[in-house]
Image (cartoon, helix red, strand yellow):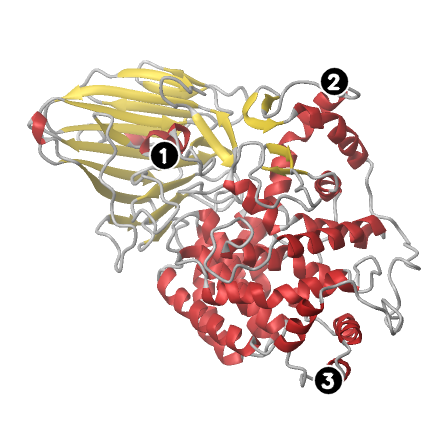
């Protein structure tokens, strides 16, 4: 799983901007002082950077178009043969003796292979002991689980070449990281928007993975030198505080990500590079116990952060058994991860945060844990945790949309579940997963009706088949999730004909404010509001499935649940309720019945968010999409009330409306229909949602009577 998500956030942001950046690069190339810092570019209010960086970035983008791995690299001088030491015997090291002595004291010098290190240290020859330790790690064999074999690509080239001139990017934010007076990088700086997410991202150092991959692909010594300099810079600039820290440098999640996303790659991939100096290697090794201590004694309190940190603690213990405390690290990590697995994963395989994105994050950690256990021949432990990991993959597989992507629920991006599912195939004998991972090219088609219901998650998946044109819907009738939750219970998403129609707004980012409120709250979801109020929050976690209706048959599915709204005693209103029932007539369409129980004047607002590339227009009885090619959706409202219908797209003022985000920090205008009416007592209204060419008689028959 290590290579699957390498540099993903950086690459996603860059990919979305490559075309507009290339166009703008041509327009402003050669200018030396244009614009002001943190100005929006390419007419996108969510893209920020200093325009003066453009003359520096433009040639990098141009060169990236022609980038390719070097064939038949002459490694002479670039990588030393194993028998040739990095430094000749007797060399003095440029490293603090106190740091080196502390490192030696933290090692188990009786570990096989460290005999020469022990001999030199007992003679108080720190320099030779340090060089012997470096050569030990050069010669040491590393298990495959620690090696990221993902090859470099042209996006890695852009990431690294920009980083080499201190320009970084997170999502669609670009900026130049300042340096301190002593010349070291300012690792605390929050970037152009003074955003903690930026500083966290920089301190994970994921760009170093791209640099080591480029070194392997090209033999370019400057890439090894860059990794060398940044590792040494980070260790010297950021002494370990040895207390619980929420700083960007020592927040425990960044500690974990830094180990997994850069440091292991450096010591393994650059093992024979003379440009990765003994001093930098020893600096990194001296910081390993500090990283372990941060995850052992000062981890996050809960959630996927704690899980990630403890899995990385296990990774350090297994990767570096030479340290005296490695058995303590491993024991703590195993106990915690096994406990978290029982606590955080529902029996139906859903991770407690109930978001497709963090399902994958947790899965990556648990799958990584399995791989680490295998590398350590921990057969008994593998047998105890493997069934839970299988249940998680099963959930991940069966919520998948026809196009292979996952649902955009809670704090999620649009994740390629199909591609990720392929990583699980070697571990589990599941021909149905093979079928789903290969879009039916291999494996065995899943048996029974294609719809699924996950009772603990409360996630209903309605579909009529497994091909990419299949009908698919996601109906959320479960708990809110332990973290990263949105107030979106009873939300409905619909896709068919290879297109998204009704969608979730996504997460966008985590910056507090009205924009975050829109994406996280009910206003960005396909739900009902009463007097513009959100429903009461349900439970974040459950010990048993919530009471709902869930029926799956060969011909149709029926799912139903309710939410409560707060009372308004000053207005003479007691508790209010909204019940939503979704009946899916397989292969035809959906009948959505909304019942509002309220007394006294109440404004009912119903929201329907369409995918950004759908063109929507009003009809006499509802809405329809009018795309010139492919499938279209028709929605009809059956009600005895008069409704006001307004369409919004990309509105920021006076309130946010009509936005969708499928990638972190990126959003697109999307048509959002908002229906409003006034009621004074219990009211029921029904929506018929189907492809425009569906057999509507089979949907409308009996609907009015119902």
Q: In this rendering, would 586 be left or right of 271?
A: left
Mark 1 sits on what residue?
Answer: 589
Q: Residues within 10 Å of mark 3 (few under 14, many from 20)?
A: few
Q: Earlier in the sequence, mark 1 or mark 3?
A: 3
Which circle marks residue 122 in the picture? 3
- Residue in view at x 49 percent, y 46 percent: 466
Residue contact between numbered discs 1 and 2, judged by CB atoms under 8 Å? no
Q: Residues within 10 Å of mark 1 (few under 14, many from 20)?
A: many
Mark 3 falls on what kind of element? helix
Frontmost residue, 690 versus 550: 550
Residue 261 seen in render: yes
Mark 2 sits on what residue?
Answer: 27
Mark 1 falls on what kind of element? strand
Q: Quadrant of residue 462?
A: top left
Mark 2 falls on what kind of element? helix
Tell me the quarter of the image containing the N terminus.
bottom right
Residue lying at the far left of the rendered structure: 572
Q: Could you tell me how far apart the alpha carbons at marks 1 and 2 are, in whole angstroms? A: 49 Å
Q: Could you tell me how far apart the alpha carbons at marks 1 and 3 are, in whole angstroms? A: 78 Å
**Foreground disc of the pair 3, 2:** 3
Frontmost residue, 37 versus 142: 37
Q: In this rendering, would 191 be left or right of 27?
A: left
Q: In this rendering, would 554 be left or right of 277?
A: left
Q: Could you tell me how far apart the alpha carbons at marks 3 and 2 are, in whole angstroms? A: 65 Å
- Residue in view at x 31 percent, y 28 percent: 688
In the depicted structure, whether residue 214 falls above or below residue 128 = above
Q: In this rendering, would 218 be left or right of 101?
A: right
Q: Position of residue 332 (x, y in %)?
A: 47, 73
């Amino acid at each position: 799983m290590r290579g699957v998500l390498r540099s993903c956030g950086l690459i996603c942001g860059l990919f979305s901007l490559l075309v507009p950046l290339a166009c703008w690069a041509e327009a402003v190339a050669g200018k030396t002082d244009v614009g002001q810092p943190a100005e929006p570019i390419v007419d996108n209010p969510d893209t920020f950077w200093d325009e003066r960086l453009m003359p520096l970035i433009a040639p990098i983008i141009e060169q990236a178009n022609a980038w390719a791995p070097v064939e038949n690299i002459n490694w002479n001088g670039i990588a030393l043969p194993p028998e040739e030491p990095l430094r000749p015997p007797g060399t003095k090291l440029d490293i603090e003796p106190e740091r080196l002595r502390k490192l030696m004291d933290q090692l188990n010098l009786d570990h096989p292979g460290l005999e020469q290190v022990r001999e030199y240290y007992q003679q108080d020859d720190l320099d030779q002991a340090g060089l012997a330790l470096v050569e030990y790690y050069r010669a040491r064999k590393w298990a495959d689980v620690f090696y990221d074999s993902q090859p470099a690509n042209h996006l890695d080239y852009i990431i690294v070449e920009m980083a080499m001139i201190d320009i970084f990017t997170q999502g669609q934010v670009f900026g130049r990281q300042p340096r301190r007076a002593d010349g070291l990088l300012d690792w605390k700086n929050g970037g152009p928007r003074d955003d903690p997410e930026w500083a966290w991202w920089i301190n994970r150092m994921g760009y170093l993975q791209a640099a080591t991959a480029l070194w392997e692909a090209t033999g370019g010594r400057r890439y090894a030198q860059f990794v060398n300099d940044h590792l040494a810079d980070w260790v010297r600039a950021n002494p370990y505080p040895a207390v619980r820290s929420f700083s960007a440098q020592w927040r425990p999640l960044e500690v974990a990500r830094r180990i997994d996303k850069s440091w292991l790659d450096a010591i393994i991939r650059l093992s024979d590079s003379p440009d990765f100096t003994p001093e930098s290697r020893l600096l990194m090794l001296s910081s390993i116990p500090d990283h372990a201590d941060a995850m052992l004694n000062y981890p996050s309190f809960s959630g996927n952060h704690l899980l990630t940190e403890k899995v990385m603690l296990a990774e350090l213990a297994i990767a570096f058994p030479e340290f005296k405390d490695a058995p303590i690290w491993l024991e703590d990590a195993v106990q915690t991860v096994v406990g978290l697995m029982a606590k955080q994963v529902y029996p139906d395989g859903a991770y407690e945060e109930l978001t497709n994105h963090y399902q994958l994050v947790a899965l990556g950690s648990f799958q990584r844990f399995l791989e680490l256990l295998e590398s350590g021949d921990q057969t008994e432990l593998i047998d105890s945790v493997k069934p839970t990991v299988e249940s998680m993959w099963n959930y991940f597989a069966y919520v998948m949309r026809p196009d292979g992507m996952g649902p955009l629920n809670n704090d999620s991006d649009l994740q390629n579940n199909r591609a990720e599912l392929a990583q699980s195939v070697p571990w589990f004998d599941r021909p149905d997963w093979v079928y789903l991972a290969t879009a039916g090219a291999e494996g065995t088609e899943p048996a029974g009706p294609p719809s699924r219901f996950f009772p603990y998650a409360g996630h209903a998946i309605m579909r009529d088949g497994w091909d990419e044109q299949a009908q698919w819907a996601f109906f959320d009738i479960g708990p809110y999730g332990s973290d990263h939750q949105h107030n979106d219970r009873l939300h409905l998403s619909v896709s068919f004909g290879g297109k998204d129609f009704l969608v979730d707004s996504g997460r966008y980012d985590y910056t507090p404010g009205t924009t975050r409120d829109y994406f996280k709250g009910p206003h960005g979801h396909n739900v009902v509001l009463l007097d513009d109020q959100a429903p009461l929050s349900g439970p974040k976690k459950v010990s048993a499935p919530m009471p709902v209706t869930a029926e799956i048959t060969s011909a149709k599915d029926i799912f139903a649940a309710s939410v409560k709204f707060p009372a308004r005693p000053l207005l003479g209103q007691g508790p209010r309720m909204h019940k939503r029932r979704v009946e899916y007539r397989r292969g035809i369409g959906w009948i959505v019945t909304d019942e509002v129980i309220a007394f006294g004047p109440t404004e009912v607002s119903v929201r329907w968010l369409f995918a950004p590339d759908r063109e929507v227009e009003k009809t006499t009885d509802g809405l329809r999409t009018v795309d010139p090619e492919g499938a279209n959706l028709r929605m009809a409202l059956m009600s005895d009330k008069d409704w006001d219908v307004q369409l919004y797209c990309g509105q920021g003022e006076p309130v946010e409306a009509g936005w969708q985000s499928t990638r972190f920090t990126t959003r697109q205008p999307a048509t959002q229909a908002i229906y409003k009416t006034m009621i004074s007592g219990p009211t029921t209204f029904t929506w018929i949602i189907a492809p425009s060419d569906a057999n509507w008689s089979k949907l409308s028959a009996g609907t009015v009577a119902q």
